[in-house]
Amino acid sequence: MVALSLALLAWSGSVFAQPECVILLHGLARTSDSMSALAEALEKEGFMVANVDYPSRQHPIEELAEIAIPAGLKTCAGHRTHFVTHSLGGILVRYHLQHHAVEALGRVVMIGPPNQGSEVVDDYRKVPGFKLLNGPAGLQLGTDSNSVPRALGEVAFDLGVIAGTRTMNPILSQSLPNPDDGKVSVANTKVAGMADFIALPHTHTFMMQAEPVIEQTVHYLHHGRFRHDNP
């Protein structure tokens, strides 16, 4: 009878447990629409989703982090909270978590993050129109002494990084160590303290919409590791 009661409690607890929540953060010069395929896949897996739209070209990283992440946390309040980010979105999470604690923080998956900055910014920051297209945050994503990502240091949270190895922009790729995704080199997506890493044959601009990337993201959120046997 006791064993049966414990089993019923475990069963009822799993049924009535609150769902986990995922905050999605898009990349530079994109919108939340770019993360819609991920949002749909995560909802099918039973996650609550906060697909945050933020003005990525209007403010520096420090201000964007204080705009985007509290908006997502408001939706996820009371739930275990994960983050899935593309490009700049990952740097916002690193900045926020270096300055704030997140209650019931779960796992983080970064897709194509410039964790060590991008040489593209170094080479093109003075080209006319670069700041107009990429805003103040774009200027902070280089690899020099003004690089915000390089100033953030080691991560202290459960992080999986997905890098891309294909490029649709051979001109920008000339600024990058190979392999790269057209915006960020594979080497510069990595950061000390990450729990797992995988490189997939997709390009920076569209990798967050690719089915293998989405599948690996979901697997990491569930298990804390990628599927290296079937990338």
Image: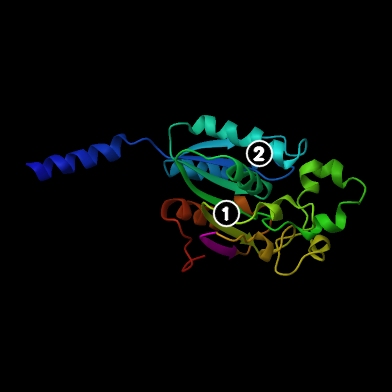
Residue 16: % across, % down? 30, 34
The 10 Å Cα crowd at callout 2, few under 14, some 14 to 19, many 20 or more, is many
Residue 223 image-quadrant placement: bottom left
Q: At 81% from the left edge and 54% from the top edge, which residue is drawn?
A: 121
- Residue 196 in magenta stretch: yes
Report the amino acid beneath label 1: Val
Is residue 205 visible in the rendered structure shown here?
A: no
**Number of dots carrying numbers:** 2
Residue 64: % across, % down? 69, 37
- Residue 159 in magenta stretch: no
Report the amino acid beneath label 2: Ala
The 10 Å Cα crowd at callout 1, few under 14, some 14 to 19, many 20 or more, is some
Residue 32: % across, % down? 64, 38
Q: At 89% from the left edge and 45% from the top edge, which residue is drawn?
A: 129
Question: In the rendered view, would you say 81 is above or below 216?
Answer: above
- Would you say 96 lies left or right of 218 here? right
Give the Cα separation between the discs numbered 2 and 1: 16 Å
Which disc, if any, is residue 65? 2
What kind of element bears circle 1? loop
- Would you say 156 lies left or right of 205 here? left
Question: In the rendered view, would you say 125 is above or below 52?
Answer: below
First to last magenta residue range: 194-199
Residue 1 image-quadrant placement: top left
Is residue 196 visible in the rendered structure shown here?
A: yes
Earlier in the chain: of badge 2 and badge 1, it is 2
Residue 185: % across, % down? 71, 63
Q: At 47% from the left edge and 55% from the top edge, which residue is drawn?
A: 220
Q: At 53% from the left edge and 49% from the top edge, which residue is drawn?
A: 108
Say how the picture is coloured: rainbow
What residue is pinned by disc 1? Answer: 155
